[in-house]
């Protein structure tokens, strides 16, 4: 799966999830809940987590795309703490930053 398709797939899952669950308008939070964002992360993980550790390592993240330059930039963004592993918590945090 290319990075563009992978991240496009993520966006469809993310927005589709919060529309289907009736969370289109948010009273307390801006954007989807952590549960919904986490669900999108788990969907990406299901196709990319080759070693089954429940996290997205840099090699796994980079393998999502044929465009290595873009993949490297994207993977570094999602790896908020720079430890070369993208966890669900980091993913949720970074999505929330994008939603601000």
Image (cartoon, rainbow, N blue to C red):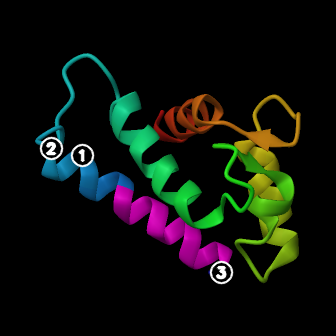
Label 1 or label 3, whichever comes before in sequence order: 3
Name above or below for residue 67 compared with residue 27. below
Residue 3 in the image, given as x and y percentages of width and height = 66, 73
Main SS, magenta residues: helix
Residue 90 in the image, given as x and y percentages of width and height = 65, 32
| Residue at the (46%, 69%) spot, across then down | 9
| Residue at the (50%, 33%) spot, across then down | 96
Residue 38 visible at all: yes
The span picked out in magenta is 2-13
Closer-to-camera residue (19/64): 64
In three-dimensional space, the C-alpha distance between marks 1 and 3, rounded to whole angstroms, equals 24 Å
Residue 80 in the image, given as x and y percentages of width and height = 75, 33
From the image, tell me which residue sits under label 1: 18
Residue 31 visible at all: no
Q: Quadrant of residue 65?
A: bottom right
Q: Residue furthest left?
A: 22
Left or right of 40, for residue 87: right
Left or right of 61, for residue 92: left
Quarter of the picture holding the N terminus: bottom right
From the image, tell me which residue sits under label 2: 21
Neighbor class of circle 3 (other Cα within 10 Å; few <14, some 14-19, many 20+) is some
SS for dot 1 = helix
SS for dot 3 = loop
SS for dot 2 = loop
Neighbor class of circle 1 (other Cα within 10 Å; few <14, some 14-19, many 20+) is some
Label 3 or label 2, whichever comes before in sequence order: 3
In three-dimensional space, the C-alpha distance between marks 3 and 2, rounded to whole angstroms, equals 28 Å
The answer to if 57 sits in the magenta stretch is: no
Neighbor class of circle 2 (other Cα within 10 Å; few <14, some 14-19, many 20+) is few
Name above or below for residue 29 compared with residue 1. above
| Residues under numbered marks 2 and 1 in contact, where contact means CB atoms less than 8 Å apart | yes
The circle drawn on residue 2 is 3
């Amino acid at each position: 799966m290319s990075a563009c398709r992978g991240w496009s797939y993520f966006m469809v899952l993310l927005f589709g999830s919060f529309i289907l669950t009736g969370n289109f308008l948010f009273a307390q939070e801006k954007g989807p809940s952590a549960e919904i964002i986490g669900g999108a992360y788990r969907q990406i993980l299901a196709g990319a987590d080759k070693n089954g550790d429940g996290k997205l390592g840099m090699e796994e993240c980079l393998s999502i795309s044929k465009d290595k330059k873009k993949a490297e930039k994207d993977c570094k963004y999602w790896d908020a703490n720079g430890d070369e592993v993208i966890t669900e918590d980091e993913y949720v945090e970074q999505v929330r930053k994008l939603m601000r």
